[in-house]
Image (tube, rainbow, N blue to C red):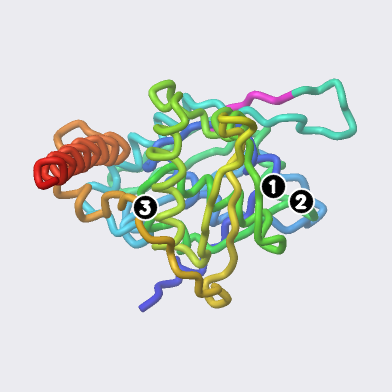
Amino acid sequence: METPHHSYLIVKANKLIEAAYRLTLAEQRLLLAVIAQIDSRPTGDSVHDVNFEVSASQITDLYEIPLKQSYELMRDAAERIAERWVVIQHPDPDIPALAYTRTRWISAIDYLPSEGRIRLYLAPKIMPYLTQLAGEFARYKLKHVSAMTSIYAVRLYELLIQWQMQGEREVAVDWLRERFVVPEQYSRIYDLKRRVVEPAVEQINAHSNLWVRWSQRKVGRVVVAFQFQFGLKANQPVIPAPAGNSVPRAPTRSEIERAARPGETWDDVRARLMRERDKSEKRECSSQGQDASGGA
């Protein structure tokens, strides 16, 4: 049964969707809970110093997090967001010399622990990308990303939603690394695909209203771009998967919750489980290879 929260709309300017930033899962979820409250329509009135309240019960309803943990997670996420930067490229087409704007997400936080609420004040430089939007923006329902546990799945979903009418999008590898602020440990293309692209596509297919397939484009032997084909699941074409080309399954939310260790974030647990799965698959492949050679 859907709650009123399932109808929440997220509306962002394209410039913000394509900005360079990195947020943890908890930080993303808190910001989305705030953005869902914003009236993005052009009203003719400027918006300044607007605050938005988020409650622990709201976080619980949106993301199925135990209520006793929600306020602490929300408070900690707000404090980390206050230190985060977002870089918006070429923010004003009327000022070609302005290469980029670097701004915080929020400018202040009010705490109401006895009521299980916090109040966030969005930074003035961020507001124009969330309000008064008359063109060049994308929108989607929060419910389509609320179950995702990969920070990259939410970002990729937004990039695809921008091009929903076209049904395909090519994303340069270097551009994706920069915009997603991908860690150095994923510098190899194998790791980028395994840790970023594949889990993101899997979770979009599992939790959102989109189906996605992807491939890669090479120049010589170098992968230079990822190519995505996608559309609404209601219109998904039936194409059999090629034999022997299975995509490794990312940990589910329940698996992450069960495996979490004290002090680990969702991203930490997920990365650890994927590493353990990698090792297990390599051992299995090695064992199968030895059996095959031994039986020849």
Asked whether residue 260 appears in the rendered view, the answer is no
Give the residue number, with chain letter if any, for mark 1.
13
Q: Nearer the viewer, residue 249 or 215?
A: 215
- Residue at position x 77%, y 23% in the image: 99
Assess whether mark 2 and mark 1 are in contact (beta carbons under 8 angstroms).
yes
As measured in the structure, the alpha-carbon distance from the residue carrying label 3 to the one carrying label 1 is 32 Å
Q: Nearer the viewer, residue 38 or 167?
A: 167
Density class for disc 1 (Cα within 10 Å; few <14, some 14-19, many ≥20) is many
Q: Quadrant of the N terminus?
A: bottom left
Numbered tag placed on residue 70 in the rendering? none
Mark 2 residue crowding within 10 angstroms, few (<14) / some (14–19) / many (20+): few
Q: Earlier in the sequence, mark 1 or mark 2?
A: 1
Residue at the image position 18 percent from the left and 41 percent from the top: 289
Residue 104 is covered by the magenta coloring:
yes
Q: Secondary structure at mark 3?
A: loop
What element does badge 2 sit on?
loop
Q: Earlier in the sequence, mark 3 or mark 2?
A: 2
Image position, residue 53 (x, y; %): 46, 49
In this view of the protein, can residue 203 be seen by the observer? Answer: yes
Q: Identify which amino acid the numbered label 1 is placed on.
A: Ala
Q: Position of residue 72 (x, y in %)?
A: 27, 40
Comes first in the chain, label 3 or label 1 = 1
Q: Amino acid at mark 3?
A: Val
In whole angstroms, how far apart are the C-alphas of marks 3 and 2?
34 Å
* 138 sits left or right of 1 in the view: right
How far apart in space, not on screen, are marks 1 and 2 (Cα)? 6 Å
Q: Which stretch is magenta? A: 100-106
Which residue position is annotated with label 3? 247
Q: Say which element carries label 1.
A: strand
Q: Disc 2 designates what residue?
A: 136
> The disc labelled 2 sits on which kind of residue?
Glu
